[in-house]
Image (cartoon, rainbow, N blue to C red):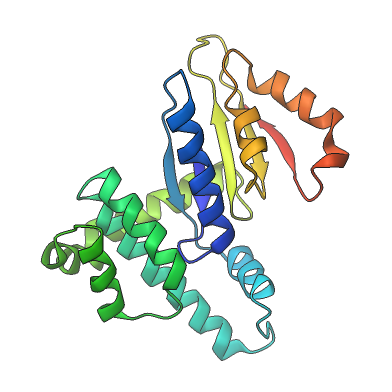
């Protein structure tokens, strides 16, 4: 499961909590990765969700810079382990509204991260390379908005199809996608039949 998120997005925080709960409850192995996304559509949707003036170019640039700084901070945190970086990300999403080094370091301390290492890695070339790689993967998977999930069933060697679901902040929806023994294609067909009950959700099968 690839969960594409906005590192300052509240709806993305809901998706992350839902997915972690599902993984904790599951009787099977679910491999997952949180991937932060920064694109114009993501900025636009965030401003709309926060009721910000989308015609204010200075404000738009500020939002873009804020998300960018948060993305790099999270990617730098991942170098110190998944659990610590996940805790860091989820705390960041609750309070981070502007590029604030002091706040980032306070959150890093709460997540038991090495703050000196985080500062060193935050704007390093390696972090930026990892960021670029994430954005390329998001582009290849046609990610337009966050939160979006892409699920693959690697237990079936003959299937390389993946299911893309946009606006996936629902526990029930994500649990359906993670159902054991159900292929992405079958899940897609099942969800299509009940699409009226999950409005504002887009389904696409990737291959």
Left or right of residue 85, residue 19 in this image: right
**In the depicted structure, whether residue 162 falls above or below residue 186:** below
For residue 104, which quarter of the picture? bottom left
**In the depicted structure, whether residue 151 falls above or below residue 153:** below
- Judged from this view, the residue extending furthest toward the front is 25
Left or right of residue 88, residue 169 in this image: right
Q: Residue at x 25, y 72 (%)?
A: 106
Left or right of residue 44, residue 10 in this image: left
Quadrant occupied by the C terminus: top right
| Residue situated in front as seen by the camera: 105 or 202 | 105
Q: Residue at x 25, y 80 (%)?
A: 102
**In the depicted structure, whether residue 9 falls above or below residue 55:** above
Residue 80, position as x, y percentages in the image: 19, 50
Q: Residue at x 41, y 29 (%)?
A: 31
Visible residue check, residue 130: no
| Residue situated in front as seen by the camera: 24 or 151 | 24
| Residue situated in front as seen by the camera: 170 or 138 | 170
Visible residue check, residue 125: yes
For residue 206, which quarter of the picture? top right
For residue 32, which quarter of the picture? top left
Number of numbered discs: 0
| Residue situated in front as seen by the camera: 91 or 115 | 91
Residue 81, position as x, y percentages in the image: 23, 45
Q: Residue at x 58, y 14 (%)?
A: 159
Residue 111, position as x, y percentages in the image: 25, 58
């Amino acid at each position: 499961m690839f969960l594409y998120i906005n590192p300052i997005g509240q709806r993305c925080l809901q998706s992350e909590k839902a997915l972690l709960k599902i993984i904790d409850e599951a009787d099977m192995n679910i491999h997952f990765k949180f991937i932060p996304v920064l694109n114009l559509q993501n900025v636009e949707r965030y401003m709309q969700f926060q009721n910000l003036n989308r015609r204010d170019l200075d404000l738009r640039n500020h939002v873009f810079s804020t998300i960018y700084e948060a993305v790099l901070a999270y990617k730098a945190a991942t170098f110190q382990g998944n659990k610590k970086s996940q805790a860091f990300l989820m705390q960041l999403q609750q309070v981070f509204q502007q590029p604030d080094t002091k706040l980032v370091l306070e959150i890093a301390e709460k997540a038991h991260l090495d703050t000196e290492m985080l500062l060193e890695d935050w704007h390093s070339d390696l972090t930026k390379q990892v960021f670029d790689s994430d954005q390329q993967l998001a582009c290849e998977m046609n990610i337009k908005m966050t939160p979006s999930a892409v699920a693959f069933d690697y237990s079936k060697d003959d299937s390389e199809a993946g299911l893309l679901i946009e606006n996936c902040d629902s526990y029930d929806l994500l649990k359906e996608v993670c159902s054991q023994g159900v292929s992405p294609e079958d899940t897609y067909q099942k969800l299509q039949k009940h699409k009226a009950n999950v409005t504002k959700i887009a389904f696409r099968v990737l291959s």
